Amino acid sequence: MKNIVPGFVQEPLIIIVTNLRIHEEVEKVSCPVSRLCSAINGGWSQWSEFTECSVTCGIGKRVRRRHCDHPRPQEGGLYCIGTDHQEVFCEGYLPCPRKGQWCSWSPIIQHCTRNCGPRGMGLRLRQCACPKPSQDGEDCEIPPETAEMAVNLLVNNSTDAPTGSALEAILKGEGLWEPCNRHHCSYLKTLNTEEDLLLLEDLNLQRAEDAWISSGGLPQRIHGPLKLFCPSSRNSRKKIFDKSERFPKSKFYWTRSIPTSSKEPYYIPGIPIVNSNLFIVENDHLTIHSLDPSTMGIYRFGYEYEPGYFETVCFFPVYIHQWQQVCSYNASNLKLESN
């Protein structure tokens, strides 16, 4: 059987049935065909309607299509020119959940622990509002190192540790504990009227019994040990001398003096005490190893807040209770007692 090229009819003649009648009436007509058939190029159908938006929230797409079938390409005709679909952007009819993002850190540090000096610390804040979480979106992400950082701040900053509210902000990722107000302090080099009153109030609260706290409130006997202590809770310490920015050159001292008159002023510093076999000085604690007549006197804890300027914060009159000696002579005892 011969191969037939599409669109071309070769010899011999092909009989084409042009009319077919029922029963016996059939008419046959022969025609010679010896030429190529005409090619039919494809044509686009009408565009379909756009589809629904591909998302229910946010930005999606709508699509419409057409087909190359009006007519289809035939007899080697060309396919339709152009695209068979079109896309347009659309917005869903519902708002999408939105995760919160952190804003930039505030340029201002709040609640600084000091007005000046080398140790001030304060709170820098930021907000979860760029954007805010919405439509059940997640909150801003808290950095994983936040908890460890908060613990270190509490351990390593005994005097400038964050407050409770500042610590809460740090744990939420909203706060940073940073240096602040770290500049040279300009200060008044003498006590002002308010500070003088604070100091006087502390001195008026002093009692003679304060010297005997370590011995149960009773005067110590001869050769007994004695511990003296000036508490840091005194207002004159907290609000004046223990604030580095108030008197940056301030340094504490312990002294002992022996009054020569009942009218001798209480604020005369006396002789400085240093560590020895008899005394141990540990900041605001003073230990006298063994009481004897040479250790009696007025002990003072105070500050040289500027070179040559002294103030007493605590003072302690120290004496020996029931100082006694026992001498043996043969079978009889002679007892000498001094009160």
Image (cartoon, helix red, strand yellow):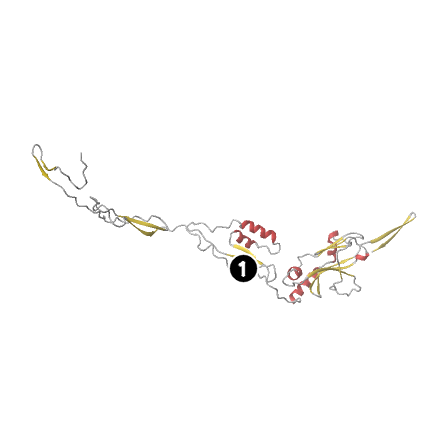
Q: Position of residue 188 (x, y in %)?
A: 64, 67
Residue occupying image coordinates x 56% and y 57%: 178
Instruction: Say if residue 314 shows up in the picture.
Output: no
Q: Position of residue 207 (x, y in %)?
A: 73, 58
Question: Relative to the observer, which residue lies in front, 172 or 296?
Answer: 172
- Circle 1 residue: 109
Look at the picture and state if 197 lies above or below 134: below
Quarter placement of the N terminus: top left
Q: Position of residue 54 (x, y in %)?
A: 33, 48
Residue furthest to the right in view is 330
Residue occupying image coordinates x 53% and y 57%: 124
Question: Relative to the observer, which residue lies in front, 53 or 241?
Answer: 53
Q: In which quadrant of the rendered view does residue 228 lie?
A: bottom right
- Please tell me whether mark 1 sits on a helix, a strand or a loop: strand
Q: In which quadrant of the rendered view does residue 252 lie?
A: bottom right
Q: Position of residue 95 (x, y in %)?
A: 38, 51
